[in-house]
Image (cartoon, helix red, strand yellow):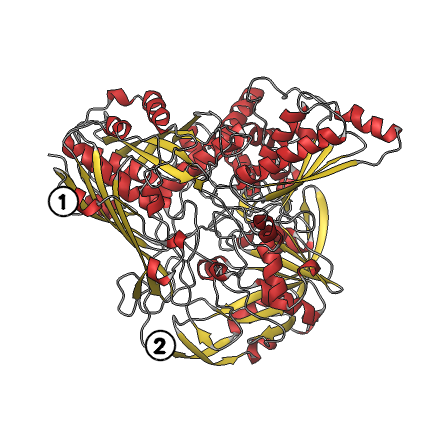
Amino acid sequence: MTDTATRPEHGPSAGDPLEVAFAVNGTAVRAAVDVRESLLDVLRERLALTGAKKGCDHGQCGTCTVLVDGRRVLACLTLAVQARGRAVTTVEGLAAPDGTPHPLQQAFIDHDALQCGYCTPGQIMSALACVAEGHAGDDEEIREYLSGNLCRCGAYPGIVAAVRDYADSARSTEG
Amino acid sequence: MSAPTGRGSDARSGPGGAPVPRIDAYEKVTGATRYAADRTPPGLAHAALAVATVGRGRVARVETAAARAVAGVLLVVTRFEEHELRPAGYRLSGGYGFQSLQPLLDDRIAYRGQPIALVVAETPVAAAEAAALVEARYEAAPAVAVTLDAAGAETVGQAAALPQPMFADLAMGDADAAFARSPVRLDAEYDIGAQHQVPMELLGTVVEWRGDDLVVHECTQNSGAVRHGLARQLGIAPARVRVVSPQVGGGFGQKTWLQSHVGPLAVAARRLGRPVKLVVDRTQTFHGSTFRPASRHRLRLGADRSGLLTALVHETRQQTSRHDLFASDFTSVTARLYGIGDFRGHQRLTRTDVQTPGFMRAPFEHAAVFALESAVDEIACATGHDPVALRLANDTGSDPVTGRPFSSRHLAACLRRGAELFGWAARTPRPGSMRAADGTLVGWGVAAGAYRASAGPAVARLRLAADGRIAVEVSGHEMGQGLRTAIARTVALDLGISAGGVRVGVGDTGEVPQHLTAGSWGTATALPAVHAALRRLRSCLGAPDEGPLDTVAAAAERAAAGRPEAVVEAVSLPPGQSARAVDRLRAGLPTPAGPEYPGFSAFSFIAHFVEVRVEPAIGRVRVPRVVSVVDCGRVASPVTAAGQIRGGVVWGIGAALRERGEPEPRHGGFHHADLAEYLVPVNADVGRVDVDFVDVPDPLVNPLGVKGCGEVALVGVAPAIANAIHHATGRRHRALPIRVEDVLAPEDDRNGNCP
């Protein structure tokens, strides 16, 4: 079944494991994945990186947001094989090695931009990209560009304040 | 990132103490927090459910061969044997389930989405594929009834169907006669659609047998009920079951009782000899657990010309399932929000072909107060009074139902402070009289809210470790409301130490007995037990009953004397409860007290002030700002309580303008069973939300003076928005949600408009 040499015109079938190599949070990983498996399931179930959450598995809620080569993607709608050769960043990869939180993570703490915390990793990854994209100019723009990340606890006011705070300090650092 | 032990900078900066940041925020922002489905024990297998595609009937045959043929499939079960799985019983009948019906025990289909097979496989993707290949033939009933008006829906009087005092109809004075002679009368019907809790965390369970012992990681607000319910289902001793639920990714009432999939999962894990995980898919959560049932309210509200409310008749009808009566309690809040002497309530239930509905944030108060506060606004209009002034004039110091005083009631302070913070004095009363520079209609609305101040029995265990740190285990669950922070802050303020040095454990039946955490009673239940345990600890250490305590020195002293770590345990009960409540706690059964206590009644109160902007051409409603002022007694944790209130306001925006579970009238179930179509508020829907607290301790409910705040936060938001829309457009809306098409629809309102 796994001898693809005998049927070169076909890709691997469903259920066949396929070895993929990519980087997660700066570390090279290899995993034998089912070609149908999402990046989210591979991160969570095979690589023990459970920071990215499953909230719908349909690209509707944003809790699974991670960065692939710096772009925000929904890990539930990204096949694991699509990550081949790419650099994946998850929420676990943001803090300094000594545990000091990333400034955006600290801003989330300072503004209590969370309650249950389940959407928080996705919010943070999405916000990081939102700021990098230049879409954090004012509160209204932040709200718009973070509206793909649902928060049922309703921590939106704190999230906007945290992202604005981080964006302002990031700009002033650059300047 | 560990905080130092001993005295911290946040201790005792004022009478109520300084705010403490959310103590588990660091773990949450770094992705370190482990929710139930984040567990991956070795050898883990993955489950998925196949569900019924008819709304009522029986399964004639389930075809599983294709599912079994999927590579990696370990098990496909369509029917469990009675000796291995029994029903857990319905919670209102002394059981532990959210409904009486346990799927996979017989061929009955009571609702669309009911599980017909459980599949277990090596990977989530194999389980999902196999579940999709399960095919069933049904003998479907010719018709289903899923709405209040459907043919075949059966309506019963609640008091007659459930002959217990707590479900009886309320009556004071002669409301019908008083209404008939009131010079100002409003007779109106209000319609509130079904809603779904949709916490971001999917229902998720990991079950693992360790010999004859079962360990369950489950996202639940009620690990005690899951433990005892599973023990009953599996026929084993409760002591053999440990349920662990330290962090729940949002509950909102969805996770209050044993879910139908947990028992089957435990049996599957035992058959396979492997741990099994099930993450219920999002669409299935709309049918696999409870929801806020649709309800309808007829209000007859009378007043005199001065705006004094004289009579209220509140008749309700609420959806329930065909197999269970989910009791309603709409009238206990409408009877008490104002000092109306003549009141009559009548509550009915309508049986429909759905899973049993249940609790969702402010389960009855949200809908009941939408009706009442919309009606009160109409009375204000009709009598020419300012809506804030009219509410202040109808305030009461005593409970109209019992005649006894409220333990504390600062609704007037909430209204006055809210009006000031909002700038209410600048409002011009005539509808449509305020416009923004771009022509957008501006509306300002107000509404009040109340929610019973309940509490239950709790156990707290405090441990002073050798390094001086304090560890607490408490009956309670953390769903994001900030209970762990409130507990840590209570310990820190009491001992004069840093909250960061307090380790808080909750939701683990392996530590202390666990009570349902719901109904805004979590903090008022857990903190008195912690408070009592602190008194014991001080006594055990020979320390004075209050004042700063150097825990590091005390621990070192004990160690030097060769004594073991100090461990104390305390039980707390709300006023009027007997030790029987503790027996029930140990049996996984809840015993919430309130709102009536010996000698007094207790409620939390709130006032919401809302600005809406309505674009006249397209009917779009936006909510740029809200001011909410809360009386929840002493604020146990200012940071997390403010978060709760803001969250409640966001919920109110969703309830008023977005959310409605649309039933499918022919095939059963709900149309809008995913997050793309069931519209919860997104970031762009929410503007500025300012929150303030009265922060006066309640003198009677508990030694800490704390009342709940998570549910009252939602109560009154929707009518404040509807009243603001009326102020903007002159149009009354008596059904939720209020959507663009409702704002634009031709006027058909007969009696709801100010002249």
Residues B53 and B590: in front is B590
Image location (x, y in percent) of residue B366: 36, 44
Secondary structure at badge 2 equals loop
Q: Is residue A103 above or below residue B137?
A: above
Q: Is residue B645 left or right of residue B541?
A: left
Q: Quadrant of residue B479?
A: top right
Residue of label 2: B141
Image location (x, y in percent) of residue A152: 46, 44
Image location (x, y in percent) of residue B577: 53, 44
Residues B200 and B358: in front is B358
Q: Please, what is the three-letter code of the amino acid marked with disc 2?
A: Ala
Q: Residue at x 72, y 28 (%)?
A: B538
Residue B621 appears anywhere in the view: no
Q: Is residue A5 above or below residue B383?
A: below
Q: Quadrant of the N terminus of chain B?
A: top right
* Distance Cα–Cα, label 2 vs label 1: 46 Å
Same chain for the residues under marks 2 and 1 in the image: yes
Chain letter of mark 2 equals B
Q: Quadrant of residue B750?
A: top left
Q: Is residue B163 above or below residue B478?
A: below
Residue of label 1: B180
Residue B341 appears anywhere in the view: yes
Q: Is residue B314 left or right of residue B702?
A: left
Image location (x, y in percent) of residue B666: 31, 69
Secondary structure at badge 1 equals helix
